[in-house]
Image (cartoon, rainbow, N blue to C red):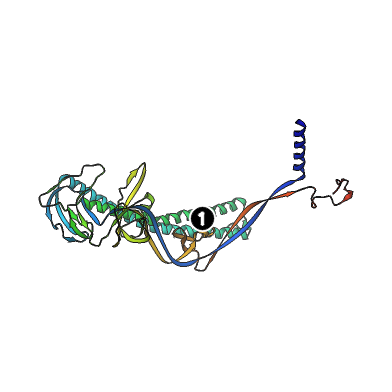
Amino acid sequence: MKKVLIIIAVVAALIFGVFKITTSKKTTTQSQTYSVTKGTLVTSISATGTITSGNSTNITTSASGTVSEVFVKNGDSIKKDQKIATLILDDSSKTKQSNAYAAYLKAKEAVATAVAAKVTADIQMWTDHQAHLTALGVQSTMNSNNTNPKTSQVYTAEERMVIDKTVDQAYLNFKASELKYQNAPAAITNAKVNLASAYNDYLNNSATILAPADGVVNNLTLAPGVVISEVTGEDVTTQTIGIVNNINNQFQATVNLTESDVTKIKADQKVSLTLDAFSDKTFTGKVLAVNTSGTSTSGVTSYPVTILLDSTDINIYSKMSVSAQIITNIYHDVLLISNNALSSLKSDVVTGETDGTNTIVKSGLSEGDKVTVTSTQSSSVSNTSSPFSSTNRTKNSNSGGMMPPGF
């Protein structure tokens, strides 16, 4: 048995020696060219949720006090923001109304500050862009001429290092200010959302109750002399005192957005929706309201957004699943470049919004310009050879080696 094992080991060693395996790297280069085109770019935010209201809107208030006058009755047709009733506020509500108004004024100031910050960021971006171009010019002069025009002496190693570092720092300053400018619209949107929220909070604490939507009043529980008690629950800030039925057979959906997305949403933005129950149909609507208070579940905060669907004769039921695309902006007649080309753009190209596929080119490129993206790929190639193959045999018989019999 031991002899058999020894023979097998010898044969294996011979086979390993006879065949030689070599591995080599093969590199291929691929290029893809993208053109700058002019067109329309639509940015949107995706969200999911459910149908939350068949075709009615609650009439709510956060105020407390005594009803002094009611201007409508059940069955009346009303318009959005029409007066429904007025209250004589109690002391608690007077304080809340005063605080809400102060918060509203502060939110107005924040919008003005955000708008001014965008202008400042725009100026700084172009200032830094010019500084980068100036630094590049100094570097180009250095690279093409050994004599420093400022000293009329040969550039020292320290001078060369400072010039190169200045170019790097100028580029970083430009990219930072460019990013700040690009983020400015989001800051303005966030400030406007907070302003709308503050204004709604002020209205909810106001002595005047307004209609939340067009429609027909129903289930209104107000009459002169009725006392509306203060809301005391921690998670409840309003109470429902009636509903408005929508006469156009419109439905509402509620979707949840993340902290980063909700700042881009505001009332009346157009929405495209699909329902699992009607997968072959697309519905349209608009943003009705944004709840900026948010809700927290397992440490994750989400912000409910109410969407009012356009009129439809399809039977839609509450709690049906909804997928929504909220259109945040539409840019007409702008220069566009594929996102695949962004990594190959020169430093002086300024870009803007993206829809995930294409990006707006603000400056640095013109319609019809080409951007080439080059990539390399490496692959392993294995070659097996034998010392006894024709390519490995000794051609010179005088080399001193002996060829085995039969070769």
How far from the left and from the top, in percent, is residue 221?
A: 15, 51
Kindly state the secondary structure of the residue where label 1 is placed. Answer: helix
Left or right, residue 268 beside residue 124:
left
User: Few, some or many C-alpha atoms within 10 Å of disc 1 (few <14, some 14-19, many ≥20)?
Assistant: many
Residue drawn 10% across the image and 50% down it: 225
Left or right, residue 311 beside residue 39:
left
Please, what is the three-letter code of the amino acid marked with disc 1? Answer: Tyr
* Camera-nearest residue between 218 and 33: 218
Residue 148 visible in image: no
Residue holding disc 1: 171
Residue drawn 13% across the image and 55% down it: 70
Q: Quadrant of residue 279?
A: bottom left
Residue 52 visible in image: yes
* Camera-nearest residue between 136 and 315: 315
How far from the left and from the top, in percent, is residue 130?
A: 49, 60
Residue drawn 40% across the image and 60% down it: 43
